[in-house]
Image: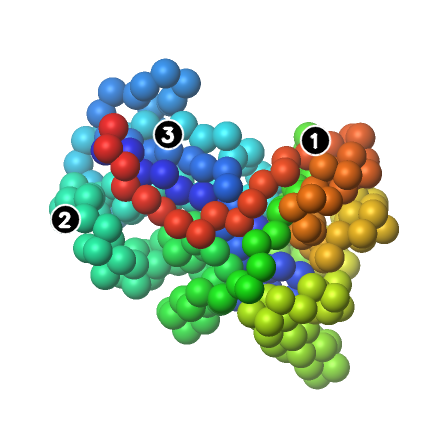
Amino acid sequence: MIVRVPASSANLGPGFDTLGLALSLHAEVGVGEPPAAAQPADEHHPATVAFRLHGGQGALWVRSPIPAGRGMGFSGAVRVGGLVAAHAQLAGSDPVALQRALPELLALATQLEGHADNVAASLYGGVVATAGGHAVSVPLSFDPAMVLWVPSFVTSTDQSRSTLPQQVSMADAVFNIGRTALLVAALAAGQVDVLRVATEDRLHQDRRLAASEPSRVALEAALAAGAWAAWLSGSGPTVAAMCAVDDAARLAAALPADGHTKVLRIDYAGAVIEPA
């Protein structure tokens, strides 16, 4: 069997550590001899660590186009892959059994990742809100394109998080609570005209963008080109923009040339066990 897991974009602006979105770019994790273009995952690889934590036996391989260190959930995706591979060894590939196991797998993935937003999206697919150990899919009344601007440099998530303040003002907290609520409601209602306001943030983006000028330029370029919304994907440096499917190619062409673009969709399936 092969476990196929989507990449993710976390935070979506104001939903710091609480919102994630699965992307149609997939890592594959499997047990046994690696196929072409796959790499063996040693005992220190995050996929193998997750696999062993859930009782997995044997050697793992990973095949992934998700760039590491770019804010697209590489570590979360391969950890989910390792956990689901171990689940498949224990319980088989029945999708109903996997659905029942999702809360346990989410708890283990969150333990490994340190926060649940990326791993919840990779496990469940779609847009997911998570808090207090729970994850709930946000219904979408439209199916947008996702345009990702991906630079050549990387960001350390731990280092990026260390620059964020331990306390914030009441005004900033209320600002983000309001934007997060508005964002979830707008996605469910299909009100794309409010998405730009709904993805504003005062908790983390400005500080992270101050350390990554190319990302700030790319985010502003996406909005200027007519994206419904744009945000720093995870801790960056990738920028994610949401738009109509018919507008995706034009938006991608308007983004800075010092990064490459990926035109993707939202992945609604989440982690899937497939026959080898």
Q: Nearer the viewer, residue 136 or 119?
A: 136
The amino acid marked with disc number 1 is His
Q: Secondary structure at mark 1?
A: strand
Q: Is residue 244 left or right of residue 107?
A: right
The amino acid marked with disc number 2 is Ala
Name the residue carrying label 1.
260
Q: Residue 106: x percent and y percent? A: 34, 59
The amino acid marked with disc number 3 is Val
Q: Residue 199: x percent and y percent? A: 69, 64
Report the number of discs: 3
Q: Nearer the viewer, residue 87 or 1?
A: 1
Q: Residue at 41% across / 67% down in the picture?
A: 135
Instruction: Report whether residue 19 is seen.
Output: no
**Which is nearer the N-term, disc 2 or disc 3?**
3
Placement of 43 over or under 136, stated as above or below: above
Placement of 77 over or under 21, stated as above or below: above
- Quadrant of the frame with the C terminus: top left
Kindly identify which numbered label has been placed on residue 91: 2
Outermost right residue: 224
Placement of 166 over or under 122, stated as above or below: below
Q: Residue at 29% across / 46% down in the picture?
A: 83
- Quadrant of the frame with the N terminus: top left
Circles 2 and 3: CB atoms closer than 8 Å: no
Q: Nearer the viewer, residue 143 or 251?
A: 143
Q: Secondary structure at mark 3?
A: strand
> Which circle, 3 or 1, is nearer the viewer?
1
Q: Is residue 95 left or right of residue 186?
A: left
Name the residue carrying label 3.
62
> Which circle, 2 or 3, is nearer the viewer?
2
